[in-house]
Image (cartoon, rainbow, N blue to C red):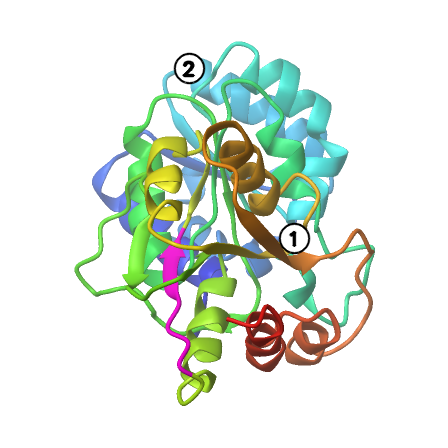
Amino acid sequence: MKATREAYGEALLELGRINNQVVALDADLSKSTKTSLFAKEFPERFFNVGIAEQNLIGIAAGLSLAGFVPYASTFAIFATGRAWEQIRNTVAYPSLNVKICASHAGITVGEDGASHQSIEDIALMSVIPNMTVLVPADPIETKSMVNWAFKHKGPVYIRLGRMGVPDVLPKDYSFDTKPYVIKKGKKIVIFATGIMLWKCLEAIELLKGYNIEPTLVNVSCIKPFPEDLIVKIAKEHDIVFTAEEHNVINGLGSMVASTLSRNYPMKISFIGINDRFGTSGKPNDLLSYYGLDPNSIKERLLSWGV
């Protein structure tokens, strides 16, 4: 079990060892975001801007114009909320080569509560032109994604979590922007993103004996959204579910619904946070409270009478 933020820190360090263009920035949270690993080995390429997220983005933009590839990190709630205008106008508008890797996203931040639980960040980043929005499912995908982002020219937002997760993707998995079918089933397809891929896998195990065998698809690229492949996979099934640790408004579910409504209208159900703020609690307790735990997912699938 390893958090995606930890895998990010390890991948950033490895990337820094092979390319001196890589620089890292943080807003006084490097121990939590794990950029501290990079800072320890490459202090001359690490910049702690203090608790000044708008400045974090501005400095990252300047470094990109100087030929560096900046990875800017802080908590997701601060990166996408406090520095939204700077991301929009300073990074995305001129399409600068800045990578924003924001940790502690979603309700699984836990006891920090609603003020720190970012359930809007996918929506806030996806609405910005030129921005690529990525959500890794596990440590394997995180490391591959960090390297992919380095090769991609332009702004990238990577959503990272605090909670430890197991490796659910194959060890030889290599990230690209296409949906990845992790389990092939019939009738039902679940499009999941982030930590919910793991929770949906556990829910599918609980469905054994109910004669329900869903297809499970990892959708880790939210923008640009892979519309053609989403439609192709949906056409092979009768019912679509989406699963995300994010507000169901303008997250993965909204992207899938918009795509299908324009191309192949069909039944769809959202598993996510239903337009509510987070609250304080243990991560697994919060997943249960918001209906994102494996048993709740199982019951949602059974409630459709399939």
Picture residue at 55% right of the left edge, 33% below the top: 261
Relative to 238, say whether 73 is above or below.
above
Picture residue at 62% right of the left edge, 46% below the top: 74
Q: Residues within 10 Å of mark 1 (few under 14, many from 20)?
A: many
Q: Give the quarter of the image for residue 238.
A: bottom left
Q: Position of residue 70 (x, y in %)?
A: 44, 31
Residue furthest bottom in the image = 209
Is 130 included in the stretch rendered in magenta? no
Name the residue type under label 1: His
Picture residue at 30% right of the left edge, 62% below the top: 182
Q: Which residue is mark 1?
A: 246
Q: Is residue 207 visible?
A: yes
Q: Nearer the viewer, residue 241 or 147?
A: 241
Relative to 92, say whether 18 is above or below.
below
Relative to 16, say whether 195 is above or below.
below
Residue furthest left in the image = 172
Q: Which residue is mark 2?
A: 66
Relative to 297, say whether 159 is above or below.
above
